[in-house]
Image: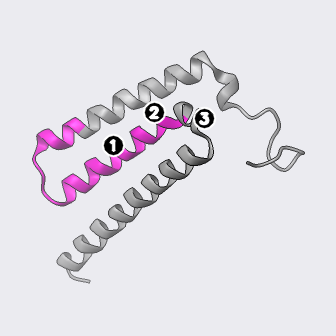
Amino acid sequence: MDRLNESALLLHLVDLVLAVSLIELLWLSLRRPTGLANLAPNLAAGLSLTLALRLSLVGAGAAWIVLCLAAAGVSHLLDLLARRRHPDLFTPTQPIGQGRQVP
C-alpha cells in the first residue's frame, strides 16, 4: 500500500471514530440525559484526542493540535475530579453477569 492510500485510510478511520463518538454522545443524551453530565468530561477528552490526531493527519498547525491536547487534558482532570467526588456514580454495585442489569 503506498503512502498516500495509507494516509487516506487513516484519515477515514479517524473520521469513523469521530462519527461513532458523536453518535454515542447523541444516543446517551437521548437515553439518559441526567447521566450524560457524568460522562461528558470522559467523552470530551476522547473526542479532543481524536480531533488532535485528525488535525495532525491533515497537517494542521501545531497551535490547533496543542489546543485539542490541552482540552483533552482539562477534560481528563474534570473526569478525575468527578470520579473522586462521586465514586458511587462510576462504580457498579455488582459486576455484570452476576445479577446486574445492563441498561
Extreme-bottom residue of the structure? 1
Reading the image, the residue beneath label 3 is 35
Tell me the amino acid under the disc marked 1: Ser
Cβ atoms at labels 3 and 2 below 8 Å apart: no
Asked whether residue 57 is drawn in magenta, I would say yes
Q: Quadrant of the N terminus?
A: bottom left
Q: Earlier in the sequence, mark 3 or mark 2?
A: 3
Say left or right for 40 vs 32: left
Between label 3 and label 2, give the one nearer the viewer: 3
Secondary structure type for disc 2: helix
Dominant SS of magenta comes to: helix
Picture disc at residue 41:
2
Reading the image, the residue beneath label 1 is 48
Q: Which residue occupies 65% across, 31% down?
A: 90
Say left or right for 89 vs 73: right
Secondary structure type for disc 1: helix
* Cα separation between marks 1 and 2: 10 Å
Residue 20, x across and y down, in percent = 45, 59
Q: Which residues are magenta?
A: 39-67
Q: Is residue 67 above or below residue 1?
A: above
Secondary structure type for disc 3: helix
Q: Which residue occupies 28% across, 37% down?
A: 69
Residue 86, x across and y down, in percent = 63, 20
Asked whether residue 32 is drawn in magenta, I would say no
Tell me the amino acid under the disc marked 3: Gly
Residue 5, x across and y down, in percent = 23, 79
Between label 3 and label 1, give the one nearer the viewer: 3
Neighbor class of circle 2 (other Cα within 10 Å; few <14, some 14-19, many 20+) is many
* Cα separation between marks 3 and 2: 12 Å
* Cα separation between marks 3 and 1: 20 Å
Task: Residue 9: name its quadrant.
Answer: bottom left
Neighbor class of circle 3 (other Cα within 10 Å; few <14, some 14-19, many 20+) is few
